[in-house]
Image (tube, helix red, strand yellow):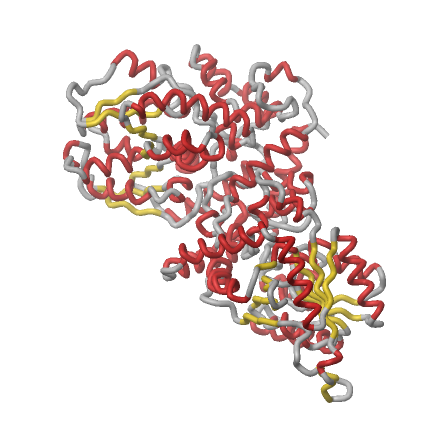
Amino acid sequence: MSKHAERERTATAFRRLMETEGEAIAKNTRTVNQLSDYALEQFDSYEQLREAAREIKENAIENLPELIDEVEQAVEANGGEVHIAQTAEDANEIVEGIMAERDAQKLAKSKSMTTEEIDVNEHLEAEGYDVIETDLGEYVIQLAKESPSHLIGPAMHKSPEEIAALFNREFDLSGEDALTENPQELTEFAREKVGEKIRAADVGMTGANFIAAETGTMMLVTNEGNARKTAVTPDTHIAVAGVEKLVPSLVDFQPFTELIARTGTGQDITSYVSLLTPPVDSPIPDFEADEFRDSDERDFHLILLDNGRMGMREDEQLKETLYCIRCGACSNACSNFQEVGGHGFGGETYTGGIGTGWEAGVHGLDSASDMNDLCTGCTRCEPKCPVDIDISWINTVVRDRLNREADPETLEYLVEGLQPDEETGSLDRQKRLFGNIETLAKVGSTAPRLANAVTGSGLGKRVLSSVFGVDQDRELPALAGETLRDWYGERGPQVEDPGRDVVLYPDLYTDYFDPDRGKAAVRTLEALDVRVHIPEVAESGRAPLSQGMIETARGQAESVHSALVTHIDQGRDVVVIEPSDAAMFRNDYEKLLPERSAQRVADNSYEICEFVYGLLENGHDIDALSTTEDVSLAYHSHCQQRTLDLEAYTTELLDRAGYDVRTADVECCGMAGSFGYKEEYADVSRAVGEHLQDELGDVDGERIAASGTSCQAQLDYLYDRPVPHPIELLAPR
């Protein structure tokens, strides 16, 4: 299949998911995300507990072999048995062996992504065993013969109406007996059915949220209570857990107990937090005899699963994935996940932003390939992660590895000169195009009218679509007649005796496509007694990094550092217009440059509105800028600007300048750099953008502004009118 046909197939699959599952998944994830936002806002200890939780996980993974030995001794001392499963096949054979040894036929399971990973249901059912899921969501998808669509909400893609129809069909209910879409009625019906299965089960199987190696104590976190019933009702309990679930002692449970519900569901604490040190002491119910048997007859097996985890532990780039506590917060915060759910943004088992790392680690790179590009690196999931995992970087690393393993494409002459030396020859043409956009901009700017005419023509769009996968409905940015650097080179600095000297970083978009916002930044700074320098400097590396081209991005970062460090040595601050480049300087360079080099750039760089705000706070007057009175303004902040906690500087400046500013709570506009230009993702991008449009509501007679290049492009597209950067509103005219 050609690359173009693959992209069309992907786009069709996403459209189908948005039509069939999109409404339910969007409603549920956005609701939970809002609840989580509120819960964290009310929680003063969040950052301290995040630090504590991360430290516990870091130490636990570092000392994992010792913890495995320790928990084995503790469980055996309690009277249980520990099994180490190197692979999914090993784990399933161990489970099957326990079932056969106990002469068991029926197994009841509580929710466990680890058992989904090993496909234990399919394995046991193929051998003739009966397996029943007891979690409501898992029970629903088991009946529907589907896979989970979310780490903690397996049936999040199902509406109450769909669940009612499923139950009515599967249990042949009609007329007065038919179930309605009332959630309470559906829950009560499922509880009765599941309860019967738990009572009839020979063996109960659970996962484990955490296991204390010191005592063998497990923590199970649920909102339904089914896990503790599954664990203690049958006389045999099998717990299947990845080795990463081990922590040293009971006291280490505390920060996770506080965090997992707030980030995952927006609750202060889940309905049931069960601490079990199996085999438990409770007597065994015998429902047929209506009596209890002695607890001494209980049998407990802990299956600790490797299945790639110890390899991940040795992989410095994927290691952080093992810190994940599977709360699902990254999925809830992700605008793309909100549109397509885990059946689009998922692999064999795991879903959402962190799912890429899990899939690559336990199933292999191929399993992560289809979902990986849905992570746009917007970083909005990361403040929600209770263990502060750099999810965007994990996705970038996986993308880089996929690039290197991809089959080479033909027609290489079409992209001659775009392939950097740092990357392999297998990189696909779409990534080459968007990852090396600076090269195209340089070439095109030598004859901008001709370049714009070619890319804007019908033939040009068809070629870009068929060869590079560029969506034909999107207008590519038009090259300016003169770059910002050329303009400034002719003009030169205008402040003779400055209060401060700064370097205005000429980001790719500002320099080649929208120099007007660069000129506005220059006028604003000069009005506040700042002398501006605009040097010859490379693109920050954001473009190649977004395509997983890490070595190319590293080369760009080294070039930028070399160009800027001389100015920094002279005491000049670096001022940045584009928030994604500010994020590169402050966050991503620490992964691309030596520590001291990255720190120097980070410590001396400022986003433009942040810098202007600082000038006003230090004695300058807003009247030096362009002001107005009571003009209503709808403002959308760039994702990474929010993650860097910079949004408030812009809104405060606009407020001081006389604007009545209102914002939307939507995490992302959906454009995300090149993402919205790619034909396979264009419909997803538009759907996310339309959600922002719905949140902003009626903007007739109102101004609109956005901080990011891609945000401006998306809002331009949605509202069919120019959307300026805030600095263009503040600049003296």
Question: Which picture quadrant has residue 163?
Answer: bottom right
Which corner quadrant holds the C terminus? top left
The answer, for residue 318, to whether it is visible in the render is yes
Residue at 42 percent across and 34 percent down: it is: 580
Q: How many marks?
A: 0
Nearest the viewer among 238 and 463 is: 238
Residue at 56 percent across and 52 percent down: it is: 324
The answer, for residue 109, to whether it is visible in the render is no
Q: Position of residue 467 (x, y in %)?
A: 62, 23
Question: Which picture quadrant has residue 162?
Answer: bottom right
* Vertical side of 30 occupied by 611: above or below: above
Question: Which picture quadrant has residue 480?
Answer: top left
Nearest the viewer among 728 and 524 is: 524
Q: Position of residue 386 (x, y in %)?
A: 48, 54
* Vertical side of 449 occupied by 198: above or below: below
Residue at 37 percent across and 34 percent down: it is: 602
* Vertical side of 168 occupied by 500: above or below: above
Nearest the viewer among 277 and 677 is: 277
Q: Residue furthest bottom?
A: 290
Q: Position of residue 140 (x, y in %)?
A: 66, 63
Nearest the viewer among 498 and 84 is: 84
Q: Position of residue 245 (x, y in %)?
A: 61, 58
Which corner quadrant holds the N terminus? top right
* Vertical side of 381 occupied by 588: above or below: above
Using residue 509 as the reference point, say whether residue 648 is left or right of it: left
Using residue 663 as the reference point, say whether residue 539 is left or right of it: right
Using residue 245 as the reference point, say whether residue 437 is left or right of it: left
Residue at 73 percent across and 54 percent down: it is: 118
